[in-house]
Amino acid sequence: MLFAAGFGTRMAPLTNDQPKPMIPVAGRPLIDHALDLVRDYKPETIVANVHYKPQPLIDHLEDSEVLITHEAPEILDTGGGLRAALPHLDNGPIFTMNTDAVWSGPNPLEQLAAAWDPARMDALLLCLPRENAIGHDGPGDFIQGIDGRAKRGPGLVYSGLQILKTDALHDIPETAFSLNVLWDQMLAKERLFTATYPGRWCDVGRPDGIVLAETLLGYDNV
């Protein structure tokens, strides 16, 4: 599940006429960088949600294997958006991935899949030390316990990529809601885990992140 429906407010004015996943980075739309990693992993199904100024993204994906869920009239946030996409996805655990970042290092989906243990975990979040999270200036999102169990707090930066079980989504009464609601339930049961990515990752949530991302990728547009 690729999250591509957001308003891209921090990316203005570049998002005045297009959705954030269509902003060029290293000569290609942001979403294509995510799709490279996803296609390399070869999942059975790829779904992307759309909402804000969706037509350029719909046109871009038209001839691809990516299925589209169009959230209208209201955006559903990450939890509601994922639940709305479930009819297109398998019943088992799934990946969710943000589309506003680039990666340098091993395929993060492969690493996450190798660390996934459904007997212990309801969700496994791929995170990075702050020094490897380029363009991210916050204190971090999670503290990783000795056994990998997550706690909220300053420390590791969440990359926007996870594996999670989706059963509990059906018990949440709201139509639009964040996946933080589901994470809080998993935290209470001590079934939310983190894994640490060994490479580097760049947040492209603001215009200044584009140059940082292109430098990470070794891109020279001259």
Image: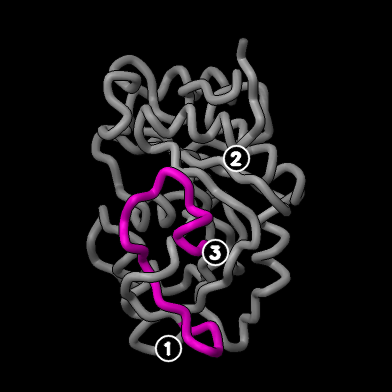
Residue 154 appears in which quarter of the rendering?
bottom left
User: Considering the image in quadrants, where does the C terminus appear?
Assistant: top right
What residue did someone put label 1 on?
190
Mark 1 vs mark 2: which is more N-terminal? Answer: 2
Q: Residue 23 appears at what percent x and percent y?
A: 46, 23
Q: CA distance from mark 1 to mark 2?
A: 30 Å
Q: Residue at x 38, y 19 (%)?
A: 18
Residue 19 vertical placement versus 165 (above, below): above
Mark 2 or mark 3, which has the lower sequence index?
2
Q: Residue at x 50, y 78 (%)?
A: 193
Residue 39 placement (x, y as % from top left): 72, 42
Q: Is residue 94 left or right of residue 38?
A: left
- Magenta stretch? 126-149
Measuring from the top left, give residue 63's x and y in whole percent.
66, 22
Q: Residue at x 37, y 72 (%)?
A: 183
Instruction: Calculate the distance from the C-alpha at mark 2 to the C-alpha at mark 3.
Output: 15 Å
Q: Indicate the secondary structure of the residue bearing disc 3.
A: strand
On screen, residue 94 versus residue 21, left or right, reads right
The residue closer to the viewer here, 179 or 205, is 205
Kind of residue indicated by mark 1:
Glu
Q: Position of residue 211 (x, y in %)?
A: 48, 27
Which residue does the numbered mark 2 point to in the structure image?
Answer: 34
Residue tagged by mark 3?
A: 126
Q: Amino acid at mark 2?
A: Ala
Is 160 one of the magenta-colored residues?
no
